[in-house]
Image (tube, helix red, strand yellow):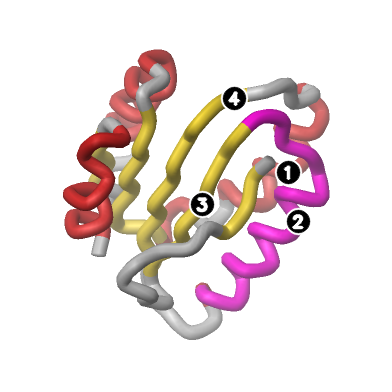
Amino acid sequence: MLRIAPFEPDVDHVVPLEIDGEINSRDFANVLSDLEKRLATHDTLRLYIEIKSLGGMGASTVFNELKDAIKHWDRFDRLAVVTDVEGVRTATTVIDKLTPKMECQTFRFDARDTAQAWVT
């Protein structure tokens, strides 16, 4: 599941996402729709992503859905990833190097409050 998650404080320039298990095309479509609405009113956005677990996701789903989302990467200036999954923590470091306009940091779940404060 990929979804827009509750986030405190409720600020429109932060896109709070939650990933837990398998992600499908419908999940991507819902998130992309919300993202498009926020981009219509903000020059830049910030991403806050909590990754609880990663499940199956077909390669075709990933490529078909990410091609639409990737065109917006230059509109994000911060990415906070909250996870205890080590592979994801490493991947976030790579994203930080590939996206010089976006500041990226990873946090463990016990530092969730720090992550929310940093991304806000």
113 over 13 or under it: above or below: above
Residue shown at 38%/31% (left/top)?
83
C-alpha separation, residue under disc 2 versus residue under disc 3: 13 Å
Residue shown at 27%/45% (left/top)?
112
C-alpha separation, residue under disc 4 versus residue under disc 1: 17 Å
Q: Nearer the viewer, mark 2 or mark 1?
A: 2
Residue labelled with disc 3: 17
Magenta segment range? 21-38
Q: Which mark is residue 54?
A: 4
Nearer the N terminus, badge 2 or badge 3?
3
Amino acid under disc 2: Ala
C-alpha separation, residue under disc 4 versus residue under disc 3: 13 Å
In magenta segment, residue 24: yes
Residue labelled with disc 1: 65
Residue shown at 72%/36% (left/top)?
23
- Residue 94 is situated, as x and y percent measured from the top left of the image, at 34, 24
Callout 3 crowding tier (Cα within 10 Å): few <14, some 14–19, many ≥20: some
Nearer the N terminus, badge 3 or badge 1?
3
Task: Name the secondary structure under disc 4.
Answer: strand
Task: Name the secondary structure under disc 3.
Answer: strand
- Residue 61 is situated, as x and y percent measured from the top left of the image, at 79, 34
Amino acid under disc 4: Leu
Amino acid under disc 1: Glu
C-alpha separation, residue under disc 2 versus residue under disc 1: 8 Å
Q: Which mark is residue 29?
A: 2
| Labels 4 & 1 near each other (Cβ < 8 A) | no
C-alpha separation, residue under disc 3 versus residue under disc 1: 16 Å
Q: Nearer the viewer, residue 120 or 113?
A: 113
Callout 4 crowding tier (Cα within 10 Å): few <14, some 14–19, many ≥20: some
| Labels 2 & 1 near each other (Cβ < 8 A) | yes
